[in-house]
Image (cartoon, rainbow, N blue to C red):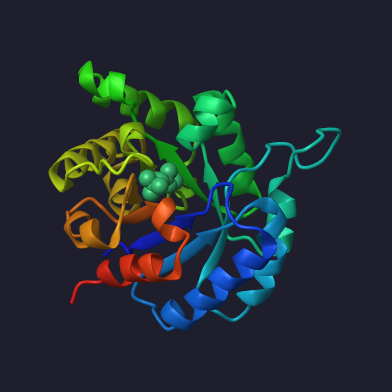
Amino acid sequence: MRKKIIAGNWKMFKTVNEAVELVNGLKREVSDITAVDVVVCPTFVNLAVVADMLVDNNIKLGAQNLFWENEGAFTGEVSAPMLKAVGVEYVIIGHSERRQYFHETNDTVNKRLKSALKAGLLPIVCVGENLAEREGGKTFDVVKDHITGSLAGLSPEDMGKVVVAYEPVWAIGTGKTATSAQAQEVHKFIRETLTKMFGGAVADGVRIQYGGSVKPENTADLMFQPDIDGALVGGASLKVDSFAAIVKNSIKK
Ligand code: 13P
């Protein structure tokens, strides 16, 4: 059985005081939940403060990006060992906003991924098609390209540590959620692709999150599909009530 993982991607939201307030609220609401993994991913500047607040807590800490070199003259970048040292456990890699606005490619995603694994971080690797690609019938081609390119050269053992997030770009921040059938179809395809790359045993164990306008109201429908193992939540992760409701709705009653 794959344990579900619900992660909040805070993107570029929350000052330090706002982050503290949100984490305090989440600690009240979801700290005692162990049936699913709950992860919050604040901005870099708020990681250390949130890490201190989550010591001895079930809520886990994630970052939103990293650079692949361990240290050096790379102004503005943050490395995997630095994230690890501050108490980060998970790291989002290759989010569509990074691919779109910051020129990330499968190749740079792959470098970040290998660096994260080497430092002992658990990567959440994002893949997904945009609207033109979906309407052009290219969804499976794009997702296959993202999966094979981003995860190239990983050992089966390392792949066992990776979480994949399927985030159709047309569903991000638009209020347009993929239907559970649309999402399940792509998640199944991702697992089949992983089976070809890493073998059935590894692919069966990989957690594949759905992301794109996940809300409390659509969580259960999405989460109870056979190949959907959690959610990567943007907007609805910024408020205690909605994120806590998503976490609770992802647990089968
Ligand atoms: P929304 O939940 O705001 O659509 O964002 C999804 C996302 O990009 C999470 O990484």
Percent position of residue 112, x then y: 61, 37
| Residue 153 seen anywhere in this rendered image of the structure | yes
**Quarter of the rendering containing residue 181:** top left
Residue lying at 17% horizontally and 54% vertically, measured from the top left: 225
Is 249 positioned to the left or the right of 19 in the image? left
Percent position of residue 233, x then y: 40, 53
Residue farthest to the left, as pictured: 181
Q: Identify which residue, 115 or 156, lies in the foreground.
A: 115
Q: Position of residue 219 (x, y in %)?
A: 25, 59
- The image shows residue 98 at horizontal and vertical percentages of 54, 33
Q: Is residue 40 left or right of residue 86?
A: left
Residue at the right extreme of this rendering: 73
Residue 185 versus residue 61 in the image, above or below: above
Residue 164 in view = no
At 82% from the left and 34% from the top, the residue drawn is: 75
Q: Is residue 130 left or right of residue 238?
A: left
Q: Quadrant of the C terminus?
A: bottom left
Q: Is residue 39 above or below residue 174?
A: below
